[in-house]
Image: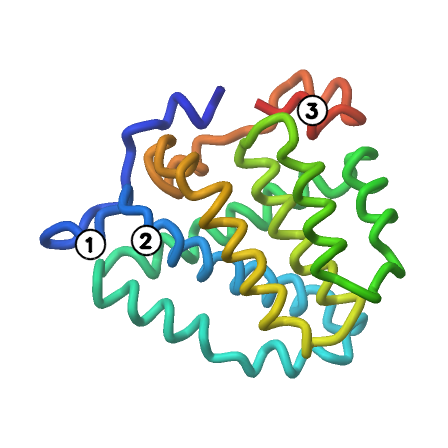
Amino acid sequence: MAAEAAAGRQLPPSSGGPGASDNLSYILRVGRALLIGFIRSLFQQHANDHPQRASVEQLSEDVALMDDLAREDVSAADQVSSLREFMLRLWQELSNNSEITSMVHSVTGNSNNPLKVLAEVSETMFANGINWGRIVVFFYFAYRVIAQTSSSWFPAVLEWATDFLQNRLVAWIQQQGGWIAMLNYTISSRCRRRPENTLSSMD
């Protein structure tokens, strides 16, 4: 797996420990900053479709997180920005996949309980394992359930997704060498030949 080849690469650690990229709490905080930035970027890209965009953009938590990361590690904020842009490009590659499109349609209009929808999609997504592509799609669905409901759900969705990151994904990310390992990830040629099986065949 491409991510495994990147294992051992880390975000440059701060002077002494708590900022090291393989630290679980640091990985979680970077992940939360990435999630907020990813969601905001998608709202900006689809501004005309989301009248609630302004409410989401007024959130300042992502700025606070970036400042906190920057104090801990002067290169972290730039790396978070680079990782977010990489995730957005990867999503563009994945967004035309028929399997993912089918999952998107399955949640469209199902807005009575967005947390339940996100939980069901997430369980399906990671039923057969974890990889960077699936994490990007997970981030997209966090955006999607907010986009089709109300920005008032943003805090609840963010908390649920952060808990899922902590309980299900952070340890795997640590094993790969931290978030920076994602930059080595590419969608396999097998997935490009058989796009309908992207989630089951991504490595």
> Mark 2 sits on what residue?
25
Q: Is residue 200 left or right of residue 73?
A: right
- Label 3 to label 1: alpha-carbon separation: 35 Å
What percent of the width, then of the height, locates residue 81?
Answer: 43, 57
Say few, some or many: other residues with alpha carbon within 10 Å of mark 3 (under 14 / 14 to 19 / 20 or more).
Answer: some
Under mark 2, the amino acid is Ser
Using the image as rendered, state which of residue 199 and residue 120 is in the foreground: 120
Percent position (x, y) of residue 127? 65, 31
Label 1: how many Cα within 10 Å (few below 14, some 14–19, many 20+): some
Query: Disc 1 vs disc 2: Cβ atoms closer than 8 Å?
Result: yes
Quadrant of res 51 = bottom right
Amino acid on which disc 1 is placed: Pro
User: Residue flagged by tag 3: what amino acid is it?
Assistant: Ser
Q: What label sits on residue 18 in the rendered view?
A: 1
Q: How many numbered marks, from 0 up?
A: 3
Give whichever of discs 1 and 2 has the lower sequence position.
Answer: 1
Local crowd at mark 2 within 10 Å, few (<14), some, or many (≥20)?
some
Which percent across, then down, holds residue 71? 22, 67
Q: Secondary structure at mark 2?
A: helix
Q: Is residue 45 left or right of residue 132?
A: right
Report the residue marked by disc 3. Answer: 200
Question: By what rule are the colours in the image chosen?
Answer: rainbow
Quarter of the image with the C terminus in it: top right
Q: Secondary structure at mark 1?
A: loop
Residue placed at 67% from the left, 37% from the top? Answer: 125
Q: Position of residue 138 (x, y in %)?
A: 63, 47
Q: Is residue 202 above or below residue 54?
A: above
Disc 3 on helix, strand or loop? helix
Position of 42 relative to 47 (above/below): above
Residue contact at pointers 2 and 3, CB within 8 angstroms: no
Q: Looking at the image, is mark 3 or mark 1 earlier in the sequence?
A: 1
Picture quadrant of residue 90: top right
